[in-house]
Amino acid sequence: MAMSMSPAVSVSGLVKTFGRTRALDGLELSVARGEVHGFLGPNGAGKSTTIRVLLGLIRADSGTVRLLDGDPWRDSVALHRRLAHVPGDVTLWRNLTGGEVIDLLGRLRGGLNPDRRAELLERFELDPTKKGNAYSKGNRQKVALVAAFASDAELLILDEPTSGLDPLMEEVFRGCVAEGRDRGRTVLLSSHVLSEVEALCDRVSIIRAGRTVESGSLAALRHLTRTSIEAELGDAPQGLDRLPGLHGVDLGQGDGGGVHLRCQVDTDRLDALLRVLSAAGVRTLTSRPPTLEELFLRHYEQPAESAPQGVTS
Amino acid sequence: MTAGRMTAGLGELLRLALRRDRIMLPIWIYALIGSVVSTLVSIRRLYPDDASREQLAQSINGNPSLRTLYGPVYDAHSVGALTAWRILPFGGLMIGLLCVLLITRHTRAEEESGRLELIGAGAVGRSAPLAAALGTALTACVTVALAVPLLMTAFGEDAAGSFALGLAYAGVGLVFAGAAALAAQVTGTARAANGIGGALLGLAYVLRATGDASGSSGPEWLVWLSPLGWAERVRPYRDNAWWLPALMLAAFVVQVAGAYLLADRRDLGSGLLPQRPGPPAGAPSLRSAYVLGLRLQRGSLYGWTAGFLAAGLVFGGISQGIRQLLQGSGSAQQLLERMGGTHGAVDSYLSTMVSTFGMVAAVYAVQTVLRLRGEETGGRAEPVLATGVARLTWAWSHLVYPLLGSAVLLLAAGLGLGLGTGAVLGDLGGWTWRLLGAALVQLPAVWVFAGAAVALFGLLPRWTAAAWGIVGVLLFIAYLGPLLSAGQWVLDLTPFTHVPRLPGGTVTLQPLLWLTLVTVALGGAGLAGLRRRDLG
Ligand SMILES: Nc1ncnc2c1ncn2[C@@H]1O[C@H](COP(=O)(O)OP(=O)(O)O)[C@@H](O)[C@H]1O
Ligand SMILES: [Mg+2]
C-alpha cells in the first residue's frame, strides 16, 4: 500500500489538566503507519484521555498532536471518516438493536463492508436483534468491535477493547487485529492486559501518570531489561558481588553437590555474568527473557528501583 | 425472619439515596413549603379584609378560566382557606412530580444503569431498593406534612385546618409516589417510568380542572377521579375532610403492595413486558445523525402531542358553560382582564388555556434540550462524534425538537381547543383557525426556555440541570404572579408575559421578535460554547 511516511499518530509534550488533576503531563506517542502499537498503562495513567484528545473530543492544554497528517481538533470530522474507534465502556441506545447500531456507526463513518459485517457477527457470535439495554458488557463491546472491524478505516483506535470479553472472544479479537494489520491498517491498542499486547503489538509505549516512561519495539524494550538466569555450577562463582547490574541473587546448595544460582541481570551485563559463571563451571543453565509483565512491574513498582526480596550475596 | 432478609440493607440504601439527593431534595422541599408561606403572606397583604376577600371569591368563582386554573374558592372568610385553595392545585402537581422523579431515580434508573446489580450483589434484600426509594419520597412528604402546619399555625392560622392542609398537600405526593413505584416495575426504562408518571400528573390536572371549570352545571364529578381533586376537596380550614388524606394514604399503600407483587414477578433489570427482538440490520434510512435523533426523540414527541391534543379537546369542550356562568358577574371583569384577553369571556378563557399550554410546552422544550446532556454524560454522544458527525450537527439533530417539536405540540393543543370549542359553540372552522394561530404565537416564548437550556449546556455543562430551576421559577411566577399582583417587573421576567393574548387580543410582532432574538442570542452562545468545550 502506498502511504506517506509520516506517522499515523504523533503526539509530543501533551498536557491535559482537569481542574487540579494533571491527567497528561508531557506525554509522547508515535505510531507508525501500518503498525500495531500497544499503549500500556495502569488504570488512571491517561490512556483514555490521550485517545479523547486524538478524537478531538477534548482539547489539549499544550503540546503538539498530529493524526493522519491532520489536526485532531480542527479537522475532526474529516479525520473521523478515516478511523474507527472502540471506546473502553460502550453504552448503546436502548431502543436501537445491535445490528442497527453497527450499521448506523458504519454509515456515519462513510460505509461498511456488508460481507465482513456478516462474517464478524458470526465470528463474535453476536445476536444483532437485541435492543441496546439487553446486551451484557461484553456483547456491547462486541457491537462496537464489529462496527469498527467491518469498516474500511485506515486507523483503528481501540481503548481497552477486550475488557468485557471472554477468552474465546479475545482470541477472535486477536485474529481480527492481525487481519487488520495484514490489510495494512494502523492500530492503536490501549490495554493493561500485557499478554494481549505482547501477542499483537509491533511496538509499545508504556505510560504512567500521564507521562511516557518507555517506548519502542518489544525486542528493544526487552533489551533494556533484565534476563532471569538459573544455573547449576560446579563451584561457587567468584566476584559476583563486584558485578554491576546484578539483582536478586540467590545462591544455594545444588542437588548434585554443586552450587545453585538464581538471579536477574541487566540484559546489557549478561556477557560479564556468563564469564564469571563459566569460570565456576556451568553444569546446567536456563535463561529467560523478561516478559512484558516484568517490564511493566518494574516501571510500576512503588519505589521504582528497589531490589527484589531474598537477596543474599 | 424472611421479612428481615428481604429488607436487609435498607438502612444503608436509604442513607445512600438521601446522600445522593442532599442538594436536590432540600431545594424542592424548601420551594414546596416556602410557596405556601409566601402565598399566605401575599394574600394577607392583598386582601386584608373580608370585603376584599369576598370580592376575590366572587370574581374567581364567576370566571371559568380562573376556576379551571385554581379551582373554586370555597371559603372567602379565612385567609388559611384562600391559601389552601391557591396552593394545592399547583403545589400538589409539584410534590407529585417530585415523588415521581425520586422513585424513578432510585429504582428504575438505578436498575437501568446496572448500579442496583452492584448493590444487589451485596447483602441487600430484594425488597430493599424499592423500600429505600419510597423512604426518600416519604421523607419529603412527611417533612411537608409537618412543616406546613407548624408554619401556618406560627402565622396564626387555625391548627386543625393547618394540619388538614399539610396532609392534603403531602397526600398528593404519596399517591404519585405509589403510582411511580408501579410504573417502575412495568416499564423497562427510567424515561418511560417518568413518562408514565408525568402523563398521570397531567391527567390528574386535566380531570381536576375540567371538573372545576363549570361547577355543578358541568361534569363536576371528574374532580373525584383526580388525586389533585381529592386534595382540593379536603377544603382545609372549613371542612377539614380527614377521610380524604386517609384515602390518599390507602391509595399509596395499595399501589405499593401492587408494586411489590409485580417486583416478585420480574427479573432485575427488566420490566414486566418482555423485550422483543428488533431488526438485525439498520433500515437504509438510518444513516444520519438526524435519523438517530428522530429515533431517540420521537416516542416522547408522540406522547406529548397526544396529551396536548386530548387536553385541548377537553378544555375546548368545556367552553360551553362559560357564557351563562359569566352573565351577571361583572366583578370578574377586572381580574379577567389581568388574566387574559379583553374581548369576551370565551376568548379570555381560551387565551388563558393557550398560555397554560405554552408553559407546559416549555417543559417539553427544556426536557428535549437536556437530552443532549444525557447523551453526552451517558457516553452515547462519543461514538457518534467519533464518526464523521460534527458537533453542531449532533446538537441540531436534537435541537430540532425543542424548536419544531414544540410547535407541533402547540398546534396539537390549538387544534384540540379549536375543535372542542367549535363543536360546542359552532363555527368549527373559525375557532380552529383562530386557536391554531393563538397557540403558535406562544412558540417564541417557549423557545426562550430552550435557548436558556442550550446556553447552560454549552457554557456551563455541569449546570445544565439548572434549566429546570429556571423553568420552575418562571412558571411559578407566570402561574401565580398575576393573581398575587406581583410587580410588573417580576412578571416581565417570564417570556409568556410578552406574548399577545390570543384569541381576542391584538397581534403585535415586536415582542415576538424580541423573544426570538433572545433565543438566538442564548442558543448561539450555547452552541459556540459547545464547539469550544471538552465533551464527556
Ligand atoms: N473528565 C474528567 N474530569 C476529571 N478528571 C478526569 C477526567 N477524565 C479523566 N480524568 C482523570 O485523568 C486521569 C487519567 O484518566 P484516564 O485517561 O481515564 O486513564 P486510563 O484510561 O489510563 O485508565 C485519571 O486520574 C482520571 O481520574
Ligand atoms: Mg481508560
Image (spheres, coloured by chain):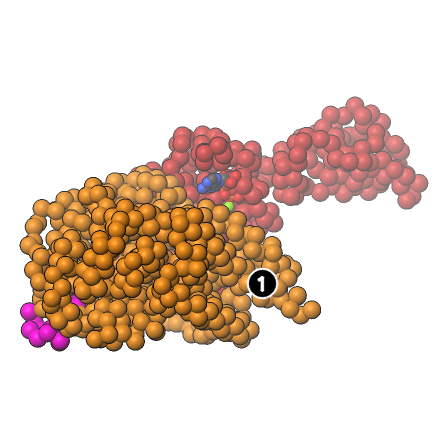
Chain colours: A red, B orange
In the image, the segment drawn in magenta is: B414-430
Q: Is residue B165 magenta?
A: no
The crowd level at tag 1 (other Cα within 10 Å; few <14, some 14-19, many 20+) is many
Residue A134 located left or right of residue A226: left
Foreground residue, A241 or B533? B533
Drawn side of residue B458 relative to residue B508, left or right:
right
Q: Chain of mark 1?
A: B
Residue B409 pos. (x, y %): 22, 63
Instruction: State the predominant SS element of the stretch in magenta.
Output: helix
Above or below: residue B254 compared with residue B404: below
Question: Which residue is found at the position 18% from the left and 63% from the top?
Answer: B63
Task: Report the residue marked by disc 1.
Answer: B128
Query: Which residue is depicted at the point 93% across and 40% down?
Result: A257
State the residue lying farthest toward the right. Answer: A257
The answer to whether residue B348 is above or below residue A154 is: below
- Which residue lies at the image location 55% right of the left edge and 73% below the top edge? B264
Q: Residue at x 55, y 52 (%)?
A: B16
Describe residue B143's horizontal placement relative to residue B208 as left or right: right
Residue A154 appearing in the image: no
Looking at the image, which is closer to me, A250 or A229? Answer: A250
Q: Secondary structure at mark 1?
A: helix
What is the three-letter code of the residue carrying label 1? Ala
Q: Inspect the magenta stretch and tell me whether residue B422 lies in it.
A: yes
Name the spot of residue B497 as percent of width and height, x first. Answer: 18, 49
- Asked whether residue B212 is in view, the answer is yes
Instruction: Give A18 or B93, whichever is nearer the viewer.
Output: B93
Would residue B259 appear left or right of A283 to someone viewing this image? Answer: left
Out of B309 and A11, give the one closest to the viewer. B309
Viewport quadrant of the N terminus of chain B: bottom right
Outermost residue on the front side: it is B50
Q: Where residue A230 appears, x then y in whole percent?
A: 79, 40
Q: Position of residue B223 (x, y in %)?
A: 31, 71
